[in-house]
Image (spheres, grey):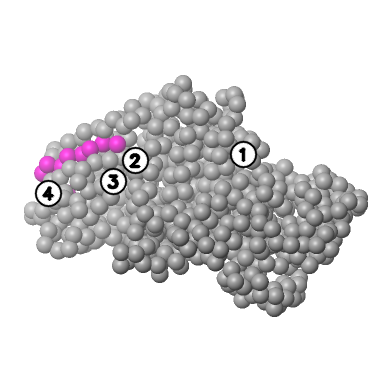
């Protein structure tokens, strides 16, 4: 047993982090910067990461990119196209529950219903609750074949893992923002992070992040390496834990920012919105968790 | 990256499974029997080659990577065997801070279980603020004379030896006046007072009163004033779930609750999720140790995570069985101590905020 990332995986993660830091929206005001978005789109397209799966990459690699893109609030499609590519439809984006949640600039959707694959044409994409990923309505489904049951389960597991990775990344972004703020914002003549009441909230957030990293890494590996049922269960566990943790972490970030955290200009709500939207894609409830089978 | 057993790990696991099948008829059948036969269990685990994975062979260890400890913990929990004795923090403490002579004299007996140990750190007036301890060690010829009062001393009633912190110098800054000793518990001048805990158990924690007990100066660990560094090593390792091997024990309780049937509430599902998180977290931490990353303040993250998991399992017990099953109810009661022992959750958060997040707490 050795669950460390390989050096190639570390390089991929670092490259995704750098791209997100360089070209992602550094502040809320930059969300509307069309030139930046165009540069980001061009750069992400050039990496080829949207077709990681058809290039033979494992769930771990897709999750690493999704996590760093969540952390950097990358506001061009990744998760949607990566999952569509996993279903054999490179260039399309995933559709779930009648909408394509990650459809900016994309016209074709692909949907997995049980083991049946279908394609749909998409309406005009626009930002919704999530300010970073644009969604589009999906039209009539045209059947496009079926997966075998095992592949369908793995595809489902990958969808849970990739959304969990996006959630974890966004939580890390919200957490970093709060830590930076707690070190510079002063009250009573001292940085607010020096007060235990604030410091302990941030310490709890870090523990939630570390637990999330651990369970997500296993679930991402399991997508391709465990039995399909085990992989799907691991993905459910990871999604539930990452989603609950991230919700707390983002709310903590808003609280640590005080009044400013409740303003549109503070990015804390952008992370929260992204977390909540990703939580609602292929949602997992505790009722679905198998108990006592391990 | 691979979460599976390697061929060697699998062979070890299978050998352990076979041995445990042979041992199963001898597993303790009651809490009383468990406590009475703890030492015997330690010795038989060691004799069969399943205890002390990471420690040097010259002291009775196996010189294997830490993942082997996890395999032992998983397999013990799977068949309901008693847990692996937790003394990794003591072995690590002596391994890092004691002289070769002291290591050669004491580590083999500590590891093979022929000599049993307790740890005399906390005092009634020195809990979270350990450096305020007031137990004294005064040089008299070639011996030190110990006077003071220790508390929360695990297994003190059956211990042959105590790793003791005492003040040897009152005139220096308080951290610098503390020294560590290896004290024989079988001597006049030592009085044991068991503590009955909220789960009714009085075997685990004790109070120990030292009134003129004696220890040879050669049984000081390191030099006068080195005690604090040793204490920090010991408490740091006390905080790692991989050292404690609790993940598998929590899983056992969750499985026990599931087998009881009845409606499975969200608390039990959440405890299941948390146990899986801890299990994978321990694996990640152990793998990081392969890089030679030794955990300092990160141990506080692990301890806090472990505490949350144990207490969520405790809450699942209450949600599923209320107060109706005495053993399970005691498992719940015991879970409350996890956020106190080995450093309170509040202290862990101070360490995380101050030393990892650099919050100047």
Asked if badges 3 and 1 are on one and the same chain, I answer: no
Secondary structure under tag 1 reads helix
Secondary structure under tag 4 reads strand
Q: Is residue B208 left or right of residue B236?
A: left
Asked if badges 2 and 1 are on one and the same chain, I answer: no
Location of the N terminus of chain A (image quadrant)? bottom right
Question: Which residue is located at x 26 percent, y 33 percent?
Answer: B195
Which region shows up in magenta? Answer: B205-216
Q: CA distance from mark 4 to mark 1?
A: 58 Å
Q: CA distance from mark 2 to mark 1?
A: 47 Å
| A99 and A243: which is toward the camera | A99
Q: Which residue is labeled 2 in the image?
A: B114
Q: CA distance from mark 3 to mark 2?
A: 17 Å
Q: Which chain's residue wears label 2?
A: B
Q: Which residue is labeled 3 in the image?
A: B119
Q: Which residue is labeled 4 in the image?
A: B145
Q: How many C-alpha atoms fall within 10 Å of the one at disc 3: few (<14), some, or many (≥20)?
A: many
Q: Is residue A13 left or right of residue B350?
A: right
| A14 and B219: which is toward the camera | A14
- Residue A87 - label: none
Q: Earlier in the sequence, mark 3 or mark 2?
A: 2
């Amino acid at each position: 047993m050795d669950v460390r990332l390989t050096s190639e995986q570390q390089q991929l993660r670092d490259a995704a982090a750098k791209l997100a830091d360089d070209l992602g929206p550094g502040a809320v005001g930059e969300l509307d910067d069309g030139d930046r978005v165009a540069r980001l789109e061009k750069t992400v397209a050039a990496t080829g990461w949207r077709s990681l799966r058809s290039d033979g990459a494992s769930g771990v690699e897709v999750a690493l990119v999704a996590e760093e893109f969540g952390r950097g609030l990358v506001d061009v499609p990744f998760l949607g196209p990566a999952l569509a590519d996993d279903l054999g439809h490179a260039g399309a984006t995933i559709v779930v529950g009648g909408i394509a949640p990650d459809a900016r600039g994309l016209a074709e959707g692909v949907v997995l219903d049980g083991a049946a694959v279908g394609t749909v044409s998409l309406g005009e994409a626009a930002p919704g609750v999530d300010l970073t990923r644009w969604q589009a309505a999906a039209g009539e489904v045209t059947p496009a074949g079926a997966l075998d049951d095992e592949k369908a389960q793995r595809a489902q597991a990958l969808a849970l893992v990739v959304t969990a990775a996006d959630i974890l990344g966004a939580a890390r972004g919200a957490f970093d923002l709060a830590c930076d703020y707690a070190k510079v914002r002063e009250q009573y003549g001292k940085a607010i992070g020096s007060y235990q009441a604030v410091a302990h909230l941030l310490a709890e957030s870090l523990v939630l992040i570390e637990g999330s990293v651990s369970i997500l890494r296993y679930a991402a590996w399991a997508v391709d390496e465990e039995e399909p049922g085990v992989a799907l269960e691991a993905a459910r566990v990871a999604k539930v834990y990452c989603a609950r943790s991230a919700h707390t972490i983002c709310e903590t970030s808003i609280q640590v920012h005080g009044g400013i955290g409740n303003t549109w200009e503070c990015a804390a709500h952008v992370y929260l919105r992204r977390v909540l939207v990703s939580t609602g894609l292929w949602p997992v409830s505790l009722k679905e968790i198998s108990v006592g089978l391990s | 990256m691979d979460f599976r057993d390697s061929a060697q790990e699998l062979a070890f696991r299978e050998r352990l499974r076979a041995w445990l099948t042979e041992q199963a008829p001898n597993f303790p059948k009651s809490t009383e029997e468990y406590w009475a036969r703890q030492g015997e269990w330690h010795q038989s685990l060691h004799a069969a080659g399943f205890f002390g994975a990471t420690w040097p062979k010259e002291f009775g260890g196996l010189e294997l990577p830490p993942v082997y400890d996890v395999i032992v913990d998983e397999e013990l929990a799977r068949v309901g065997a008693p847990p692996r004795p937790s003394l990794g923090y003591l072995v690590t403490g002596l391994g890092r801070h004691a002289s070769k002579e002291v290591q050669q004299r004491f580590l083999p007996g500590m590891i093979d279980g022929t000599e049993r140990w307790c740890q005399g750190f906390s005092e009634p007036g020195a809990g979270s603020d350990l450096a305020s301890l007031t137990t004294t060690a005064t040089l008299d010829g070639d011996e030190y004379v110990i006077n003071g009062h220790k508390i929360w001393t695990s297994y003190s009633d059956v211990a042959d030896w105590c790793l003791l912190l005492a003040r040897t110098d009152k005139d220096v800054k308080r951290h610098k006046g503390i020294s560590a000793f290896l004290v024989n518990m079988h001597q006049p001048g030592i009085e044991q007072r068991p503590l009955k805990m909220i789960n009714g158990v009085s075997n685990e924690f004790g109070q120990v009163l030292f009134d003129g007990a004696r220890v040879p100066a050669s049984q000081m660990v390191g030099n006068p004033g080195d005690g604090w560094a040793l204490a920090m090593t010991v408490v740091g390792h006390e905080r790692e779930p991989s050292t404690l091997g609790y993940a598998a024990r929590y899983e056992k309780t969750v499985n026990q609750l599931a087998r009881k049937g009845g409606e499975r509430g969200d608390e039990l599902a959440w405890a299941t999720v948390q146990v899986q998180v801890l299990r994978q977290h321990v694996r990640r931490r152990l793998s990081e140790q392969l890089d030679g990353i030794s955990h300092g303040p990160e141990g506080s993250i692990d301890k806090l995570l472990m505490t949350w998991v144990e207490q969520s399992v405790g809450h699942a017990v209450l949600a599923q069985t209320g107060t109706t099953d005495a053993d399970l109810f005691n498992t719940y009661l015991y879970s409350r101590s996890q956020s106190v022992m080995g450093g309170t959750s509040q202290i862990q958060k101070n360490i995380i905020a101050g030393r990892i997040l650099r919050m100047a707490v």
